[in-house]
Image (cartoon, grey):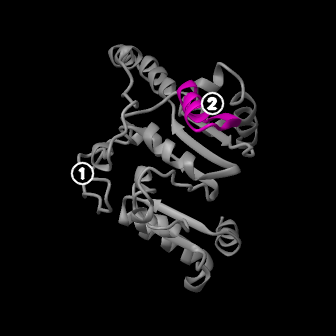
Amino acid sequence: MHSLICTAACVLQVIISDISTVMLERARATFEAACGPDGIGNVTFVCCAAQDLLSDDAARNALGLPPASTKSEGTVDEVACVDLILFHAVVEWMANPRTALQVLGRLIRPQGHLSVLFYNRNALIWRHLMNGNFDRADDMGTSVATSNSAHPTASEDATDGESGACRKRPKQRAALTPHNPQDGPTLEAWMKEDLGLEIRAWSGIRMLHDHIESSKRPGIPYIGLLAAERHWGQIEPYRSLARYIHMLGQREDSD
């Protein structure tokens, strides 16, 4: 892992963005532990919400873009400047993830990629069913998904009512189950229709492991489990029952 981090820090221009200063401090410590304090010159840490990347001047500076205030009214902000965006385990914690994805999509260069990993709504419904929580499964299965048609501000998209500005997380125990999991077809539609990306990969992650009884897991060889995950995680309907879904989208060359 350290070698991969060092390669990224030395060869690439890396931007790490989060609304939590605590998480950014941990990320910096991880890079410094792997590469040394003098080895992360190509890594920039930005405290900013994903949906605010194009309106926050510090984020725009990190992206090599001029301040938002310099853009003439009525003109299109040309911002396609990134080759790869990793947006992992974020979608399910946002009230309006579609808005954030639309911002990220504008940043991707032709031939660039967007990697999205998210908590799978179908897997959560299935877990409720397997545990006999039929009412909760019915609620999830019949409720109308959170509307993503609006374009909220950072304050509207914060999960705790605070603004999307940089802040310290409160010291309290929070539930680990995401409040807004999504499903594969929904994310596919957003990535293709909103962002204009082609889906190059679609995989179920922890498709098998999380459905095996915990008492039986220690007796299953890891190599065999990994092979089964890789195989069946590509095939429906098993892929749609995985705990997480991973999608890799690519923007084709511009005409």
In-image side of 177 versus 185 (left or right): left
Residue 123 shown in magenta: no
Residue at x 36%, y 60% (from the top left corner): 20
Which residue is at the front of the view, 205 or 181? Answer: 181
| Residue indicated by mark 2 | 208
Residue 182, x across and y down, in percent: 48, 30
Kindly indicate the quadrant of the structure image that contains residue 82. Answer: bottom right
Span colored in magenta: 184-212
Task: Tell us which disc is closer to us: 2 or 1.
Answer: 1
Task: Assign the C terminus to one quadrant of the image.
Answer: top right
Residue 212, x across and y down, in percent: 58, 29
- The amino acid beneath tag 2 is Leu
In-image side of 4 versus 45 (left or right): right
- The amino acid beneath tag 1 is Glu
Residue at x 49%, y 70% (from the top left corner): 61
**Sequence order check: which comes first, mark 2 or mark 1?**
1
Marks 2/1: CA distance?
37 Å
Residue 59, x across and y down, in percent: 46, 64
* Image position of 130 with respect to 93: above or below: above
